[in-house]
Image: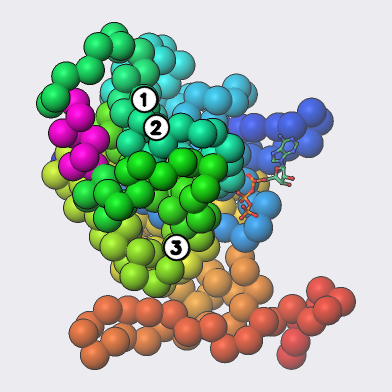
Amino acid sequence: MTGLLSLSEVSVSFGKRPILQDISFGPLESGSVTALLGSNAAGKSTLLRRIAGELKGPGRVEIAGQPVESWPAYHRNRPAHVPQDISMGSSLRVFEAVLLANKQGGGWSVDDEELDVVTQMLDTLGINSLSDRELAALSGGQRQLVSIAQALIREPRVLLLDEPTSALDLQNQFEVLDLLRRLAREWSMCVVVAIHDVNHALRFADCAVVLHDRQVEANGSPVDVLTPTLLGKVYGVEARMETSSQGHPFLIVERSIRNPLGEEHD
Ligand SMILES: Nc1ncnc2c1ncn2[C@@H]1O[C@H](COP(=O)(O)OP(=O)(O)OP(=O)(O)O)[C@@H](O)[C@H]1O
């Protein structure tokens, strides 16, 4: 594994309102999955947009040692970004949409090999049966799977996913996170996933970065970072860590430690 993505002193403001200040972490390694955590409005989506080069601001985001903005638009070192709200009002069909995602920046002729690559990707995500369906007629979870296929099809070196399992059922959540971890390893890809489920972060991520009060509150191995103390500070919940019979650590939330007036219990 080699260092691929690093941030140094990255800040983002909207108008005069600072959202993120002096965010530094990395280098995140190729072949790794990083979970980006933090409470609602902590700035996870904003940070993903900044890493993708969609927002400007002070500080540096570097991919393979170069500022993200310096990589050409369709270069594999340009991060692929799957945002949280994916609207798909188009009458394109699923197969066409994934094929088009692969053609961006390239020529428009299509050979059999490219069609096979799309079929394989739909297979990998278990959505081959949706191939001929119109995007506009998909369910929320189906849309989420198609957008992940669109991002993966070009085999990016850096993949940024904003709550990629929020619309998925339990089986699909597990399968997608497992797939992302496997593809990260196989393709030497650096995957960054904004996620709310701390147990998914514990189970599937190699690294956790937690945002709080506009800064990085903690950064490191998920089992070291996601402690009950941190959950109390960042999410205002009382939690305890257990170990499953299979040896996996998991967190159980006992209660909120914020009352409706925002004051802490004794
Ligand atoms: N385009 C924008 N213009 C102004 N403010 C914005 C914009 N986008 C986000 N914000 C603000 O920036 C802050 C961080 O939002 P962001 O969506 O990054 O948080 P998040 O951690 O992804 O939240 P959630 O977990 O709720 O999805 C919020 O206060 C939000 O209102």
Q: Which circle marks residue 258 in the picture?
A: none
**x and y percent of residue 129 in the render?**
30, 52
- Report the image quarter containing ligand 1: top right
Helix, strand or loop at label 3? It is: loop
Q: Which residue is mark 3?
A: 168
Dot 2: element: helix
Q: Which residue is mark 2?
A: 97
Is residue 118 one of those drawn in magenta? yes
Q: CA distance from mark 3 to mark 2?
A: 20 Å
Q: Provide the secondary structure element on which disc 1 rests.
A: helix
In the rendered image, residue 226, in percent from the top left (x then y), is placed at 44, 68
Q: Residue at x 56, y 52 (%)?
A: 211
Mark positioned earlier in the residue sequence (3 or 1) = 1
Disc 3 vs disc 1: which is toward the camera?
1
Secondary structure mostly seen in magenta is helix
Q: Residues within 10 Å of mark 2 (few under 14, many from 20)?
A: many
Q: Amino acid at mark 3?
A: Leu
Magenta stretch contains residue 30: no
Q: Magenta segment, which residues? A: 114-121
Seen from this angle, which residue lies furthest top? 107
Measured as percent of width and height from the top left, residue 103 is found at 32, 20
Amino acid bearing label 2: Ala
Q: Which mark is residue 100?
A: 1
Q: Nearer the viewer, residue 182 or 175?
A: 175
Please tell me whether residue 66 is drawn above or below residue 27 in the rendered image.
above
Q: Quarter of the image for the N terminus: give it.
A: top left
Residue 8 shows up from this direction:
no
